[in-house]
Image: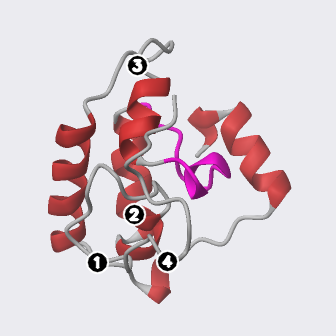
Amino acid sequence: MVDSAAPRTHEEAREPKLPLSVDDPIWYAELLIDHVELRKFYKARKIRCFGCAVGEVESFKEGCEVHGSGPFGGFDAATLVAELNELGRKHPFSEKTAVEMGLVQRLVEWAFPDRA
């Protein structure tokens, strides 16, 4: 399901900054939050968004709708974004902990999430 209210062009998108909103692309979290802490956060909730190519175009709202009936249960976008905003305030992005993942690493982490 595509949210018609979500920005679809460069002109419609807002600058990545906290606080995140449910209409922001999922990958904004990777720009704003410490990667070590973000990965811990996602892993604890069985969320597999880190490094996901779809997260570059999908909003938090869309992601929660799409994965609402997935094997790990549903996610409430507003709650998830509120928790991410708190995490971002406590652990802002740091170059020292940034993770750059190639395609193969992304596929391995997607296929075997317990290895992350």
Q: What span is in magenta?
A: 46-58
Q: Earlier in the sequence, mark 4 or mark 3?
A: 4
Relative to 27, say whether 44 is above or below. Answer: above
Q: Nearer the viewer, mark 3 or mark 1?
A: 3
- Alpha-carbon neighbours of circle 1 within 10 Å: few (<14), some, or many (≥20)? many
Do tag 4 and tag 1 residues touch (Cβ < 8 Å)? no
Do tag 2 and tag 4 residues touch (Cβ < 8 Å)? no
Residue of label 3: 68
Residue at the farthest right position: 104
Which residue type does callout 4 highlight? Answer: Glu
SS for tag 1? loop
Relative to 45, say whether 94 is above or below. Answer: below
- Alpha-carbon neighbours of circle 2 within 10 Å: few (<14), some, or many (≥20)? many
Q: CA distance from mark 3 to mark 2?
A: 20 Å
Residue at the farthest bottom position: 95
Q: CA distance from mark 4 to mark 3?
A: 30 Å
Relative to 67, say whether 30 is above or below. Answer: below
Residue of label 4: 11
> Closest to the observer: 1 or 53?
1
Q: Position of residue 63 (x, y in %)?
A: 46, 36
- What colouring does the structure picture have? secondary structure
Measuring 40% from the left and 63% from the top, which residue is drawn there?
A: 29
Q: Position of residue 74 (x, y in %)?
A: 35, 20
